[in-house]
Every structure is written in structure tokens, then in C-alpha cells.
Image (cartoon, rainbow, N blue to C red):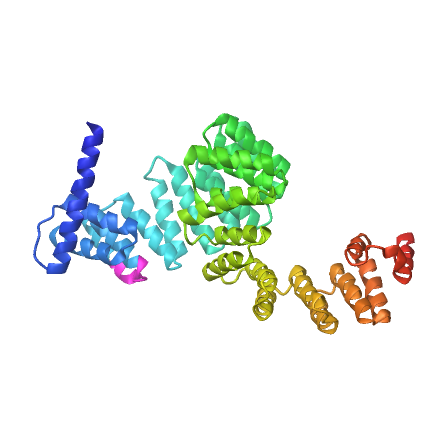
């Protein structure tokens, strides 16, 4: 019976929307009651169809000018358009019709935050503290206002007050960690997070956010322990399983990560981010066909998920299917143009299919976006080196060295190119610089000179620095 009622309600809503849209097209007057106008407005707001939502709200208010829900929806719609003065005028009208209503106060706080009137927002919230029972939400909103204002220490103080009232306020826990990270106080607050866990050892939120704190500090083993406790307390905690997977990925424990992502999917269904992470997991395990399956599912769920297209490009490259890889990588770039990794992967793949000019253009774009990434310059110069263009490869690396004079790998690679170019004196000088910056990194020379011991001059210098 319940399913039948739900189906009937769904059909009624569909018919109502058709009637409403027909009315907009024909301009013929149609009667809708207040409840219908409110539902139609909310429907279009949730769909992001602002014009139709605005029209529904406007028509509704012409018939029902005192409706609080329609007034607040109109405030939101004006704010979305950046029409803050109109939004505030409607809020004032709503206050006259519904004096003292808390929802109006919350909307006033939101508008004040949007236009940078933070002091006014805090004043409204402080007045609300005297009128509500659940003070944790008010403290949280005060914290958010201070955070928007850039006053992170004040924000931290109020997020803590929120958690003192309600340890399970997820938003307060998340924003607290974010602010502590911003001001560099996360590590000094680990004791605070442990106190939250001690206060309620059965709070899955407390354990989860302890894990988040450890993750932000790159203490992944500790993060794993915290997330595991969170999943013990709440066995269907999908977010904790997902973060547990991320921690295992950072520890390069890909089999363990795979299990956690699959469990997260089992609990909350296939989400683009989880499918994409699972694809990366299989990619790291060298199971490229399975990785492709999950990357395809990622972009099926969300065509704008650029990491999914990038993952497809990488996997097809690994399988030697270069032409297909190029298409996927270009799709990722269409969505997020300023990601240097995408351009670098495209450059290498274009070179594989013989599109040398396109490859160099992509290398150049990657270097333009992230000039301080040595990997870009090393790979770009290596293409020139493979073509036998040693002089140009050296010129390129010199530009990189000028940008990153402390990067040992650049000097080692420069030495390799200069030896092939026959400029031995300069090569030995660059080798010495590389050895001074990072002696152990000299092992990369074996990639270019398998019998390094036979390169007597090189070997002698390396031995001299080893003895130092």
C-alpha cells in the first residue's frame, strides 16, 4: 500500500509539473494551492533550474504573499543571482509577517556571510543562543562565520564549543580539522582529538576524525588504526571504509586498499570517487583491464570526473593502445585544463604515436603550468635525447636548473647528456654538483651507463665523494 501511495505521489508531482510548464508556455491561468507552489519551487531549486524556480516562487507569492517557505526560497534565489539587496528586502518583509522566526535569522546569517558583513552575522547568531536548545549548531555557525572572515583561531574556539555540546556534530569535527590544518596546529591538537575519543570511545565520529587528523599529518599507519576503530564501532560506516582505503593507498598496500573500497561500494553503492580510487588501485596492481572497468564506471556515473578519463588514458597507454589513450587524456584536459600531470601524460603518449610536434606542445604546456616539477623537464629533455638532439636537451635542462638549482636529479641528467654530446669537462662539473646535493641519487646513472665501472673518470669521482 505504501509503495502504491508513493507511486501515486510521484505521478501526481509529474502531472503537476507538466501543468505548471504548460501554464508558463500558454500564459493561461491555472490554480495551484500553496503546498503545490512550495513543492514545485523546491523541485526546480534542487534541479538547479533557477529560472523556473524563480517563476514558480514569484507566482506563488502573488497568490500567497505571507508564505514563509516561498519568501525564504525567493531570498535564496535572489542571493544565487547576486541580488543581495533584493534578498534583504524580502527578508525584512518576512520578518514583519513572521516576527521572531528562527529560519529567518538563519537566512539573514547566510546573506550577511555572502556580502562580508560578518559582525552582523555573529550578532544575529549570538542572539539566537538565548533562544534555542540545540546550541551546538549555533556555535558551529559562529565558527563558520569566523572562518569565512579569515579569523581561524576564533573559528577553532567556537567549533570546540559546538563539540562540547554535541560530540557527534560531523560538520564541526570536519571544519575544526580543516582550520587546524590551515593554521598549522593539527599536530599540537592530537591530544585534543584523543580526549574526544576518551570522552566517548563508542563515538564513530570521534575515531573517524582522529583518523582524518592523522591522514592530514601523513601518519597513515595511525590513521589506519583510527579508521579501523571507527568501522568496529559502526560496521556500516562507508566513509570510514573509504578513508581506510585511502590510507592503505598512501602506504602502497594496494590489496588492502582494494578490500576497503569494495566494502564502501557494498555499503553506499557505486560513487564516482570510490570507483575512481578502485580503478587506481587495480592500476597500481598492474591489473589494467580491471582498472579500465572501474574507470569506465567512474565516467559513466559522472562524465565530468576528469581523473576517470585520465586513468583510462594511463591504462590504455600501459597496454600499448596509444591512439585510444590520447583521446582519453584529451578528454581529461578538456575538463581540467590546468593539471600538469594530464599534459605530461599526453606529451609522452603523443610521442609514442609519432606526433612529435603535439608532444612538445604538451610538454611545454605542462612546464608552463608547473615549472617547478623536475619530472616534466627530465621527461621532456629525454625525448630530445632519444632523438639525438643532445644540445637542445642540455639547453632545456639548463632552464630547469635555473628554476630549481637545488634539484640533484637535474645535474645528474645534465651530466649524462653532456657526456653523449662530448662536453666531458662540463659533465664532470655537473656530476660533482649532483653528488654534493644528493650522493645516493647517483644510482640513476646506471640507467644510462649499465657498466658504470668502465666509465673510469665518472667512477673515480663517485668513489671520491663516497669516501667523503
In the image, what residue occupies the spot 79% across and 57% down?
Answer: 445
**In this rendering, position of residue 189 left or right of residue 136:** right
Which x, y percent locates residue 60? 15, 52
User: Measured from the top left, where is residue 192 in percent x and y?
Assistant: 57, 36
Q: Nearer the viewer, residue 313 or 211?
A: 313
Q: Quarter of the image containing the C terminus?
A: bottom right
Determine the image quadrant of residue 281: top right
Image quarter of the N terminus: top left
Determine if the magenta segment contains residue 156: no
> Could you say which is closer to the camera, residue 351 or residue 32?
351
Residue 378, percent across and down? 69, 62
Residue stretch rendered in magenta on the structure:
80-89
| Residue 88 visible here | no
Classified by dominant secondary structure, the portion drawn in magenta counts as helix
Q: Nearer the viewer, residue 290 or 167?
A: 290
- Say above or below: 164 vs 456: above
Residue 119 in view in this figure: yes
Please indicate whether residue 26 sits to the left or right of residue 385 in the image: left
Q: How many marks?
A: 0
Using the image, determine if residue 134 lies above or below residue 377: above
Amino acid at each position: 500500500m505504501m509503495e502504491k501511495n508513493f507511486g501515486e505521489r510521484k505521478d501526481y508531482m509529474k502531472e503537476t509539473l507538466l501543468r505548471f510548464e504548460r501554464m508558463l508556455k500558454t500564459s493561461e491561468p491555472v490554480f495551484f494551492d500553496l503546498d503545490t507552489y512550495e513543492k514545485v519551487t523546491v523541485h526546480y531549486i534542487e534541479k538547479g533550474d533557477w529560472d523556473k524556480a524563480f517563476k514558480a516562487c514569484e507566482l506563488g507569492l502573488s497568490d500567497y504573499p505571507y508564505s514563509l517557505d516561498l519568501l525564504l526560497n525567493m531570498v535564496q534565489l535572489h542571493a544565487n543571482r547576486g541580488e543581495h539587496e533584493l534578498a534583504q528586502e524580502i527578508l525584512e518583509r518576512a520578518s514583519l509577517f513572521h516576527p521572531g522566526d528562527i529560519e529567518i535569522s538563519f537566512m539573514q546569517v547566510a546573506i550577511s556571510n555572502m556580502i562580508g558583513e560578518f559582525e552582523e552575522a555573529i550578532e544575529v547568531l549570538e542572539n539566537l543562543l538565548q533562544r534555542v536548545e540545540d546550541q551546538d549548531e549555533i556555535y558551529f555557525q559562529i565558527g563558520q562565520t569566523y572562518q569565512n572572515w579569515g579569523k581561524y583561531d576564533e573559528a577553532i574556539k567556537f567549533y570546540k564549543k559546538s563539540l562540547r555540546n554535541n560530540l557527534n556534530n560531523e560538520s564541526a569535527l570536519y571544519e575544526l580539522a580543516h582550520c587546524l590544518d590551515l593554521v598549522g596546529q593539527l599536530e599540537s591538537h592530537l591530544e585534543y582529538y584523543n580526549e574526544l575519543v576518551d570522552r566517548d570511545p563508542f563515538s564513530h565520529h570521534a575515531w573517524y576524525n582522529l583518523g582524518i587528523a592523522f591522514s592530514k599529518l601523513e601518519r597513515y599507519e595511525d590513521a589506519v588504526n583510527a579508521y579501523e576503530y571507527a568501522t568496529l564501532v559502526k560496521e556500516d560506516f562507508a566513509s570510514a571504509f573509504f578513508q581506510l582505503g585511502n590510507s592503505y593507498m598512501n602506504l602502497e598496500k594496494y590489496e588492502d586498499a582494494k578490500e576497503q573500497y569494495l566494502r564502501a561500494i557494498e555499503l553506499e553503492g557505486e560513487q564516482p570517487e570510490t570507483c575512481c580510487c578502485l580503478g587506481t588501485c587495480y592500476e597500481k596492481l598492474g591489473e589494467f583491464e580491471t582498472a579500465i572497468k572501474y574507470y569506465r564506471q567512474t565516467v559513466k556515473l559522472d562524465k565530468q570526473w576528469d581523473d576517470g578519463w585520465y586513468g583510462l588514458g594511463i591504462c590504455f597507454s600501459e597496454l600499448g593502445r596509444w591512439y585510444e589513450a590520447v583521446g582519453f587524456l584529451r578528454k581529461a584536459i578538456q575538463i581540467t585544463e590546468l593539471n600538469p600531470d594530464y599534459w605530461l601524460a599526453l606529451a609522452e603518449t603523443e610521442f609514442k604515436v609519432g606526433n612529435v610536434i603535439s608532444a612538445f606542445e604538451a610538454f611545454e604546456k605542462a612546464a608552463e603550468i608547473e615549472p617547478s616539477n623536475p619530472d616534466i623537464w627530465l621527461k621532456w629533455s629525454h625525448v630530445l635525447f632519444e632523438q639525438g638532439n643532445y644540445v637542445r636537451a642540455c639547453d632545456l635542462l639548463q632552464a630547469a636548473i635555473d628554476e630549481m638549482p637545488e634539484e640533484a636529479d637535474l645535474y645528474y641528467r645534465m651530466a649524462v647528456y653532456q657526456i653523449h654530446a662530448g662536453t666531458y669537462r662540463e659533465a664532470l662539473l655537473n656530476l660533482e654538483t649532483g653528488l654534493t646535493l644528493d650522493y645516493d641519487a647517483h644510482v640513476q646513472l646506471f640507467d644510462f651507463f649499465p657498466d658504470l665501472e668502465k666509465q673510469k673518470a665518472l667512477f673515480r669521482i663517485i668513489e671520491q665523494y663516497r669516501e667523503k
